[in-house]
Image: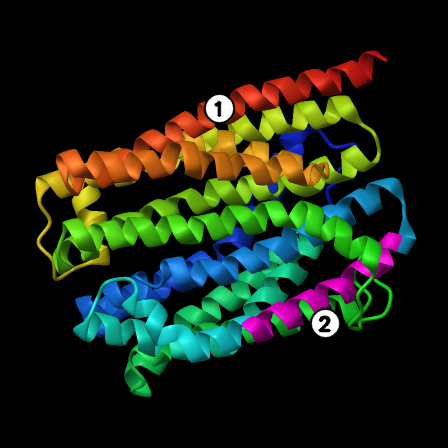
Amino acid sequence: MLREPDLLKDSPWKLMHRLSLPGILGMMVLSINSLVDSVYLSHLVSADAFAGVSLLFPLTLVVTSVTGFIAAGSSSVLSRAIGAGNQQVQRMVIPNMIALALFSSVILMLAGLFFGEEAVLLMGVEGAVCQAGVDYLQVYVLGIFFSIYGLSANGLIRSEGKIRQAMTYTVIAVVLNIILTPVFIESVGLGVRGAALSSIVSMMVYSVLTSFYFTQGKATFDTGKFRIRIEKDIIADVINVGSSTLVMQLSNVVRQFIVFRSVTWYGNAHDLAVFSAVFRLFSFVSIPGMGLLQSLQPVIGVNFGAANWQRCIHTINTFRWGGILLMCLLLLPVVTFPREFLGFMIPNESISNNELNYLRLVLLALPFLPISTSTIIFFQAIGKGKKATLLPLVRQVLLFVPLIFILPNFISIDGIYYALAIENVIYAIMLWIILKDEIRTFQSYITT
């Protein structure tokens, strides 16, 4: 039987090899669910249904933001506690995570039920596109707890370094969603609402599986009692680290709202469908790289807790270059055959050569993502939540906002694509420089 990876002793290259595939699949659960919904809606319902659900991306990012807040904060606390051998902290993590997931999901569900239609209308659409978005959102919000709790609990399994176990539950949920979505849409006749319902069912199963993992004593850390409880010290640490993910994701909500609103302002329904397809392809292709880098968090966290400074430096360099290489490999087929990929996403739309170049332009920013993402994950893993929070905010204020408002004024909808590509590259260069300075601090610990 293959032993579990040793986060304190195995070489970083070996850990990346062992953890990358499970980490990638673990990150793909929400993205695949979202992509599956979109593809099925495009083929089984209409392009309007595809555009309407795609338009919800900025709104569903709110749920992703809260999930990231709880998962990143709890995982960082747990990883460092495992590295330091602190069982008292280990026992407090799960009860606090459950309490946060329950509280936040109730608030988001009520907000979605009472203000969901108004939120969709703010995106600037009407008619069939608007109705599709409202229909999906009204069902989607009913299952918010299963997404937040399931993904946060699965993140704790990854924090142990048991990425393979976490991956198994993820694969089950994804396969279930792929099977159920066409059944609910077409066979049951629920249409757009059926796509949302299938996602809820798959995430509910996902949550049950992760719960059984902890209640049956399979975890390698002291889980304590499976209950709801708030511990002041643990919550403070979770907030310190998790707030960086929350702020980053919530700023992305505003970011995606501005982007999609700009598309509807400068373009028409066809432009919205094309942009939605380009955006989803970019997000989907980036997931493997992000999944590889998510497995960086437990390795850095455990070694930081054990004061292995040199190993932290070696690990982030290894994972970063691995992520860059993976991104380069993944973008090649999409850049080479853009018409086929866009045609799969929106089969009933005519794609121009200029729109194919939009996809190529945006995807060429992918190799820069591992640089910026690994830096944020590094700061989260070592407990430097303030720095991990500030950097994404600086990105939005100094880079995104000026570019997205200036460029489209001169070159219309083309400017939206150029703004996104340029911003990603400049941001990555900035974070490369910042991390080099942090590494010099670590090297001073080694010499002393």
Left or right: 329 as drawn, with respect to 393 = left
Return the residue found at the far top.
447
Left or right: 279 as drawn, with respect to 370 = left
- What secondary structure is marked by label 2? helix
Q: Vertically, is 350 above or below 178?
A: above
The 10 Å Cα crowd at callout 1, few under 14, some 14 to 19, many 20 or more, is some
Percent x, y of residue 382? 72, 36
The answer to whether any part of residue 396 appears in the image is yes
The span from disc 2 to disc 1 (Cα, nearest Å) is: 43 Å
- What secondary structure is marked by label 1? helix
The circle on residue 130 is none
The circle on residue 430 is 1
Instruction: Specify the quadrant of the image occupied by residue 53.
Output: bottom left
Which mark's residue is nearer the viewer, 2 or 1? 1
The answer to whether any part of residue 335 appears in the image is no
Percent x, y of residue 384? 69, 36
The residue stretch that appears in magenta: 89-107
